[in-house]
Amino acid sequence: MDTSPNQPFADLVGIETEDGRTVVRTTAEHANRNGAVHGGLTATLVDIAMGTAVRETLDGGQGAATLQMSLTYLNPAKPGDTLLATAEVGKRGADVVLLTCS
């Protein structure tokens, strides 16, 4: 998998992207005090996946930033799990793009 040199935070936490897939192989360093993977890592994974998806649709010189993001955590991940996020561009307006991620 490829990590972007323009995403130093992704490199720091071990998030990689390739072919529309964003992945992190979790370790004990990603755990919260309860022993589950920290929800902030999952949120970061989703944010990077959606950012990657929207950037692929932008014209040269355009940028994008997250305006709002809502996550629903169904089950805790455990250190050692591999988390995969796939984002899809939904509705696109003049200034705002809506995405989904699973």
Image (cartoon, rainbow, N blue to C red):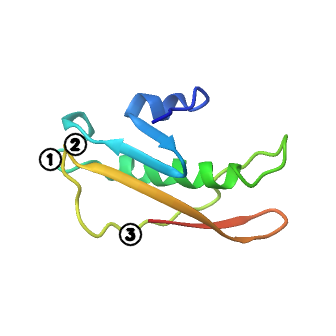
Secondary structure at badge 1 equals loop
Amino acid, disc 3 = Thr
Asked if residue 86 lies left or right of residue 50, the reply is left
Mark 3 or mark 1: whose residue is earlier in sequence: 1
Amino acid, disc 2 = Ala
User: Residue visible at 38% across and 53% down?
Assistant: 84
User: Residue visible at 19% across and 43% down?
Assistant: 80
Q: CA distance from mark 3 to mark 1?
A: 19 Å
The residue indicated by pointer 3 is 72
Within 10 Å of disc 2 (Cα), the crowding (few <14, some 14-19, many 20+) is some
Amino acid, disc 1 = Gly
Residue 77: x and y in percent read: 23, 55
The residue indicated by pointer 1 is 35
Task: Please give the label number shown on residue 31.
Answer: 2
Report the label total.
3
**CB atoms of marks 1 and 2 within 8 Å:** yes
Asked if residue 65 lies left or right of residue 102, the reply is right
Asked if residue 46 lies left or right of residue 14, the reply is right
Mark 2 or mark 3: whose residue is earlier in sequence: 2
